[in-house]
Amino acid sequence: MVRFLTLLLAASSFCLTAGAQSNLDATIQAKAKQVLPKVIEWRRHIHQYPELSNREFKTMEYIANHLRSLGIEVQDKVAKTGVVGLLKGGKPGPVIALRADMDALPVEERVDLPFKSTQKADYLGQEVSVMHACGHDSHVAILMGTAEVLAAMKKDIAGTVKFIFQPAEEGPPGEEEGGAPLMVKEGVMDNPKVDAIFGLHISSNTESGSIRYKPGPFMASSDWFTIKVKGKQAHGSAPWGSIDPIVVGTQIIAGLQTIVSRQENIVKAPVVITVGKFHSGVRSNIIPEEAILEGTIRTLDAEMQRDVHARIKKTAEKIAEASGATVEVDIDTKTLVTDNDSSLTAMMAPSLQKAAGKDKVQTQSWTTGAEDFSFFGEKAPALFFNLGGMPVGTDPAKAPGHHTPDFFIDDSQLDVGVKAFCHLVFDYANLQAKQKQAPAKKGF
């Protein structure tokens, strides 16, 4: 009888817990829908007044003022122009970080919108047009909306939520520090120490309101390389008196592609080596002394990344040596592989399904695009996912790409991003509490 009553009480407790969870989920859904008009308004304001990396001064102020109005503890000027908000819940629990990037790009907008950007700014000494051509405006607005919803539900939160608004994801200008590496360096993942971090990115070729994710390696590392080829100058009419750095440079470009096609096991993970710049010479009848090649490397495996670096250096050096030239190879790692913690991803996938609906959440293959969110994932288990922003019915093949003048998103379902962040916060804390309460398995 005692055992029966114990089981009955346990079942009753479970039902209450399930009921409370159901009410919590309904509250999140309702509040996210309620805040959507504000999210759209914020996104369009930020879109109209974009700012470049490490120059997001007005955006910083806009965010900080909003967070302070919600009673959230705010620190600004983090990593130059970043904002960190701290919301302490009404119950003890983990520290959960949510991240949004803030910066725009030196791109001139061609889309005819009422809130079209006409902003100009200085970029490395040159006046350029500025546009949110990658959707960071929507990321900021979603996280601002999430902060408003969670602040209203503060008493129900178990733990602490850290809102990270990150500058310079696109890369700081020139030799400046910035972005996620500088935020990590300044201790954003500590004080209090983050237990898990979540982030999202809008996608212009994924249908609005949908979510895509992948366990494990999701986005590529990004390395930028410079190869300086030094030869011997001569008159163009007497090439035998030269060591032609242009010819050597073209041979190096061809050699680099054999790393991808003949040397790396691309069944394991894809590799991309792209030479985007080749500069040499000043006059058509002079063989120059020097040629400079610049490009990018994308890998989705840390071991392959190191191996590709070594092979690039060896390939360039040996080809140059065969012609009597010399080379200097410099490789600068901009981002690491964005690796979604497999256990965390499996645990939190149902939260994404709550946000978008089970039929609108799918796994996707990895991408050779890169994200400096990866540096946060070095400090705590991380999950990064894509949120659709393509108008329903659009052919994905015809949707304007990121970093282009025609980039466009449908912002009518940005509340799905708010819902996702909110469900992740509550569900992660709940699952962590259940794991702590679960009795340890006894051995034999």
Image (cartoon, grey):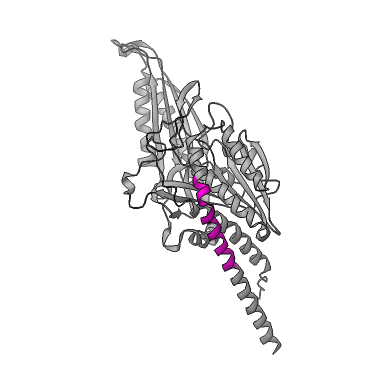
- Along the viewing direction, whichever of 225 and 186 lies nearer the viewer: 186
Say which residue appears at 39% left-offset and 31% top-offset.
275
Picture layout, residue 257 above or below residue 288: below
Picture layout, residue 222 above or below residue 127: below
- Along the viewing direction, whichever of 40 and 140 lies nearer the viewer: 40
Say which residue appears at 46% left-offset and 42% top-offset.
135
Residue situated furthest bottom in the rendering: 1
Any part of residue 343 in sight: no
Q: What is the quadrant of the C terminus in the image?
A: bottom right
Does 67 sit left or right of 342 as displayed?
right
Q: Quadrant of residue 432?
A: bottom right
Any part of residue 96 in sight: yes
Q: Quadrant of residue 18?
A: bottom right
Magenta run includes residue 31: yes
Does 402 sit left or right of 95 as displayed?
left
User: Magenta region's main secondary structure?
Assistant: helix
Residue situated furthest left in the rendering: 237
Over which residues does the magenta segment extend? 21-40
Q: Position of residue 279 (x, y in %)?
A: 39, 21
Q: Position of residue 39 (x, y in %)?
A: 52, 47
Magenta run includes residue 9: no
Q: Position of residue 335 (x, y in %)?
A: 52, 39
What number of labels is visible? 0
Picture layout, residue 220 above or below residue 429: above
Q: What is the quadrant of the N terminus in the image?
A: bottom right
Q: Position of residue 4 (x, y in %)?
A: 66, 87
